[in-house]
Amino acid sequence: MRKFIACLILGLAAALPASAKDQVTTFTLDNGMDVVVIEDHRAPVVVHMVWYRAGAADEPPGASGVAHYLEHLLFKGTENMESGEFSEVVARNGGSDNAFTSYDYTAYFQRVASDRLGLMMKMESDRMVNLRLTEQDIAAERDVILEERNQRVENSPGSLLREQKNAAQYLNHPYGTPIIGWRNEMRALDMEKALDFYKTFYAPNNAILIVAGDVMPDEVRALAEEHYGKLPANPDLPERARPQEPRQMAERRIALEDARVAQPYVTRSYLAPERDSGDQEKAAALDLLAEILGGGTTSLMAEKLQFETQRAVSTSAFYGGTSLDDTTFGLAVVPAPGVTLQQAEDAMDEVIATFMEEGVDSEQLARIKMQVRASEIYARDDVGRLANRYGRALTQGLTVEDVQAWPEVLDAVTEEDIMSAAQELFERNNSVTAWLTAPEVTQ
Amino acid sequence: MIRYVLAFVASFIALPALAEVDIEEITTPGGIDAWLVEDHTNPFVALELRFRGGASLDPEGQRGVTNLMVGLLEEGAGDMDSRAFARATEELAASFRYDLSDDTVSVSARFLTENRDEAVALLRASLIDPAFDQPSIDRVREQVNSVIRSNQTDPRRIAGRNLDELVYGNHPYGSSLNGTLDSVAELTRDDIVAAHKAALARDRLYVSAVGDITVEELTALLDELLLDLPAEGAPLPGQAELNLPGGVQVVEFDTPQSVANFAQPGIKRDDPDFFAAYVLNYILGGGSFESRLMQEVREKRGLTYGVYSYLADRDAAVIWMGSVASSNERVGEAIEVIRAEWAKISEDGVTAEELADAKTYLTGAYPLRFDGNAPIANIAVNMQMEELPTDYISNRNEMVNAVTLEDVNRVAKELLSPDKLTFVVVGKPEGVMSTIN
């Protein structure tokens, strides 16, 4: 079987005439705005995105949720457009639009016929600098984000647990504060807080334009210069230096009990290094480690806890390598009926211990790498996802070269790299173990 | 700016982007019909299979059996157990997804050109010769039980299930396709084998393929893949009778935000008024920020993060549905606003401007759907299930544009019935009383 795999891999390398990189062109406008163009001419469609290097982790203390709140408010009026008109014009042109906020970025996008690109840029560049809010916008939209918090967090014990776990994971860094905000602070968000954030961070030299689809780079450059190029850079843009994590010296344990929990589980996260520009090797090793331990049916946790024994209903491992600052590596086990959370947690630790002793199964690693290579072919079929990949990377401290090198960096990871990354990672003092439980029923 | 925009739009209205999708209809020597879109840009194929019937084929007393069967298709085949099958799939970097809905079993496959034959052999084994071994049955059963338990305390799921129960009663649509903890506990290997024969048969099969493959190659592939499936499956279930009494049913559940699902009678996909209703729904609650429900419930009043409505054309019923979530203190107001908008659009209709905007959106957005092998394969197989011809793609926008203001407003009057609009509210809604038992 091993020889079979080797042949396949060679065959695949030869069958890759054009990699995803050939689709990508990048340049920077005079005012410092970075531009990425991803070509795919199969359908007359374009995705137009503007990403700001500003997210929830850039908020001032006490104003949690303001990055996301501002994202909502950008759909209100500007000096040139009425409240709601932005989305109305997009829709009237057969397009759809939306936006999203994370710790390290806020992004706005439209999907539209490619001949409407200029109009999208005109409107997006307008709201980068000309936002005009009313007190009515402020009040109604604050109610909307509170309902969004209800829907995403308050109505879901699993989300509440995740929020508490992050807060315990980060002793000092703002990644411990939820993106949507703490409820008490969200209620106090106002015009001033929103506009302060806007004026500080929304400027072309803090933004990345990504255009993906049926467009030519020259045409994008001309339109971008016309619409974004005339906006002045913000000379006072603050440096992105968030409070960093101190040395963590004690493991944390939390338990959330909620009557709405029907399926208890245990999860643990460890503080972990992220991808850094020009230095992605350790993150690549952790990425593969997550696959090895919890990437589905053939992973080690599934093997030990779902197949060889039936102690878990499901298992998983996850690692978010793309992050500006220290990230986390997580594991979760949903126990089988009759298995306690303590037993589930012990079983999880047993898998880690076994892995540290026995090391990497080289056939498993070869299969994972085969999938990494193939994912580059599949990725070319979905420019929207490619656009997201670049946007996330460029707002989180990476360069276009880092993104393009990533598959090769993953491919170069050795078994020894993975073991030494695991050795450093599994330090209980850096971890939070969280239990989600239902109250015991008393007869 | 406003004037500029209008001028800009006007200059493009005459030229909506055209969806150019070249579909070849093929019939294999073995009698399998399929639609193919050849595109050799990227060296892989997206293949979609659909089997009509789905979870509604569950025999009496075996609710959940089709779901358990579909969950087991990836758990080993031929002489491979679960893990051997998964390893083989990973080695080829192929992906096979097996899904179930009330009306359909769907299989979505993606495989590289360079190892297509090996990938198809694996897929074939999973469809024709699944192992259904007892350890896998027991393991997947526990996973299903875990889903059933989780759904019991998820307000969205509770709302969906209670509305289905109220509307469809004893028809399969009236209960969860997962089954119950009790019904799933009773299922045997024989039941699962029978469910496999009942659901995966050639007399209810629809196929589409998009990507790096020729007509000849696909023809041979399909006969190899599918001819050993049984020719005939179980009879399809009859039409459901809808119970939509109007009013509100409150399901008490201790959570801060109430979820309200609502429904009234719908319209068939092949009804001459379908497009008028479709345009009407877009204006009423079709998911965009511009819809009346979004404007009134979210934008003006901040009562929710999201509210929407949609037309559901299911094999055994047609229904017009919607959903909103709002904190317990405010959900009563959200429901009132939705009712009022329902009545208002039914009585007064829509404006010419709303209709024009809706048409521009719907016709402009349509070609944007065809942007990748998998999305195109998906659309192509759904079109076959809806009995649409291949040239529907080029004619569809004309049908949208042919809808007149009179059509929409007549349909609004005839079809929208605030009296029949039935809500199920899950939570502790303040000031909302059950009017339905």
Image: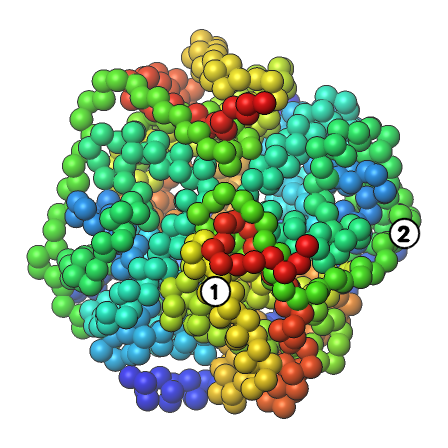
- Identify residue type, mark 1: Ala
User: Looking at the image, which is closer to me, B401 or A170?
Assistant: A170
- A225 in relation to A311, above or below: below
Which residue appears at 27% of the width and 60% of the height?
A: A70
For mark 1, name the chain: B
- Identify residue type, mark 2: Pro
- A236 in relation to B126, above or below: below
> In terms of image quadrants, where is residue A327?
top left
Dot 2 alpha-carbon crowd within 10 angstroms: few under 14, some 14 to 19, many 20 or more: few
Dot 1 alpha-carbon crowd within 10 angstroms: few under 14, some 14 to 19, many 20 or more: many
Which residue appears at 45% of the width and 37% of the height?
A: A157
Which residue appears at 39% of the width and 17% of the height?
A: A419
Residue A55 position, x and y percent, is 26, 50
Residue B288 position, x and y percent, is 48, 69
Q: Which residue is mark 2?
A: B235
* SS at mark 2 in the image: loop
Q: Residue furthest top?
A: A357
What's the image's color scheme?
rainbow
Tag on residue B334?
1
Which residue appears at 35% of the width and 54% of the height?
A: A146
* SS at mark 1 in the image: helix
> In terms of image quadrants, where is residue A325?
top left
User: Looking at the image, which is closer to me, A379 or A116?
Assistant: A116
Q: Quadrant of the C terminus of chain B?
A: bottom right
